[in-house]
Amino acid sequence: MYEKYSASPIIFCFLYLLKMANIRFWLNLWNEQRCIIHIFFVMSSKMTNPVLSSSPVDEIPKRGMEAERAYQMVKDETYPQTQPRLNLATFVTTYMDEYGTKLMNEAIDINYIDQTEYPHVAVMCGRCINIIANLWNSPEKAKWKAGAVGIGSSEACMLGGVAALLRWKAKRKAEGKSCDKPNLVMSTAFQVVWEKFCQLWDVQMRTVPISLDKPTLCPEEAIKMCDENTICIVPIAGVTWTGLNDDIEALDKALDTYNAKTGYNIPIHVDAASGGFILPFVKPECKWDFRLKWVWSISTSGHKYGLVYPGLGWVVWKDKKYLPEQMAFSVNYLGANITQVGLNFSRPAAQILGQYYNFIRYGFEGYKDIQSASMEIARYCHDKIGKMHCFANYSKGVDNPLFIWYMNPEYDKKAKWTLYDLQSALQQNGWMVPAYTMPKAIEDMVVMRVVVRQGMTRDMADMLLTDIENAVKEFEKLKYPTTSRLAYEKRERQLGKVFAH
Ligand SMILES: Cc1ncc(COP(=O)(O)O)c(C=O)c1O
């Protein structure tokens, strides 16, 4: 878009030279030169001024611009729509302390895979895997535990799922059986990554519905869905939709009986995207991890309650024997033999440094304090919201620092507003609190979710609760139903304006 102006400086230079041939020019040199140069710069800068034209959408511009201007254009377009601390929709870290941030910024140019140039980054990654494996009570005796770094829980879940698929295939082949119909069992409250995994690797997804009566994965129902083709069951610690934990200990027990009866040896992969960094600190007595017989792999997000900026995920296997050899690719890279488990080859190292920094900076007690404070704030809000006349909590307790609620069914019969209206009203005060419908089987139920992260204070919680109360007071003055209410009564599908998963 700038190229149409590109001839202008040449034309001006040409005119300028013509002028120089004129003797009168020399007499008025000073004044005229100043004037021409001024016009030259003003016109050429106006003509090429990107502020006056729209940003490139389809093609790379022919010519570039000054760094400062490019920086400003990108920055202006991507500034946050809300204050990150008022964003109660995301699980992902928006705050790290000064030194954590500095360390990560200084490592922005480090490629994790370049282990010849940065050999200690790989060691630091191994230390993080060891620390996480031990937080999850790994029985592995080897110095370096079996695990991998991912760009988030999604990559970590994929790696856990692929390992389960390859192990199942190897077992079936060894038994001379077909391996063309693998399936995986989990609740309908799965995170979208599992749908992706099943589609990409051609695995059938079998889901157990959740409901108000059975708000988490029912172990007995899950077992009923298993057969010889089940590659694994995936319970969740910190269900995205509800914040609850599936009962992994009960599932392990039921599976043990089933495996003993059938000889299928179906394992468990725990998707602990949120719970993986909560349970070890706030409920160490809860058995959900490698203490359980059939839990062979666990994944988590370092960038959620691991307290590191995005994107970072971790997956750990109970022992090397559960990590299929085909998944560890040995490559000769820049003169060194590197073994890598991961979907991506190059990846940023800064997050690994950030994770290790957090481990040594906070220690177990520091993490425990941060997670316990988030739990307490979540419980406080849960309690207060549950007592408001217009709402009902989805669960009695809070398992992780997040929870959901819905409209009290009696109140709902007469209300002129919906939780989508409340979402919009809160947004006007800067809060991001998503409203959304629940998964299959209870898809008519509209809920609202609050995720408490490090840094949310009791004062902020009170501000949020007051804003909710004030919004409800205004809604109760309405004479006519809102557009959202009319749509709700007609059972029309509504989309929340706040990103929820
Ligand atoms: C249970 C669960 N699994 C997987 C994911 C995907 O995590 P990530 O965004 O780190 O890839 C999430 C994200 O919210 C989640 O809640």
Image (cartoon, rainbow, N blue to C red):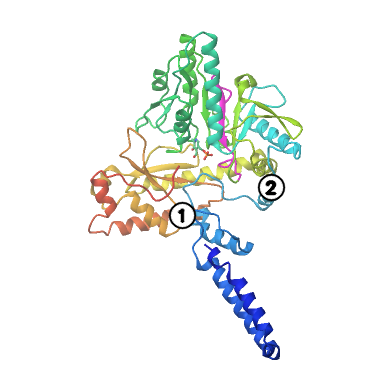
Label 1: which secondary element: helix
Q: Looking at the image, is mark 1 or mark 2 earlier in the sequence?
A: 2
Read off the magenta span.
288-308
Res 346 quadrant in image: top right
Task: Check whether the beta carbons of the residues at disc 1 and disc 2 lie within 8 A of each other.
Answer: no
Label 2: which secondary element: loop
- Residue 92 in the image: x percent, y percent? 54, 45
Give the prevailing secondary structure in the magenta stretch.
Answer: loop
Who is closer to the viewer here, 261 or 171?
171
Asked whether residue 279 is drawn in magenta, I would say no
Q: Which mark is residue 462?
A: 1
Q: Is residue 205 above or below residue 408?
A: above
Q: Which residue is mark 2?
A: 109
Who is closer to the viewer here, 443 or 362?
443
Q: Is residue 88 above or below residue 77?
A: above
Say left or right for 378 vs 321.
left
Disc 1, ligand 1: is the CB inside 8 Å?
Answer: no
Amino acid type at circle 2 is: Asp
Foreground: disc 1 or disc 2 = 2
- Residue 161 in the image: x percent, y percent? 52, 26
Tally the numbered discs. Answer: 2
Q: Residue at x 39, y 54 (%)?
A: 468
Circle 2 residues within 10 Å: few <14, some 14–19, many ≥20: few
Disc 2, ligand 1: is the CB inside 8 Å?
Answer: no
Amino acid type at circle 1 is: Asp
Say left or right for 62 vs 193.
right
Quarter of the image that includes the C terminus = top left
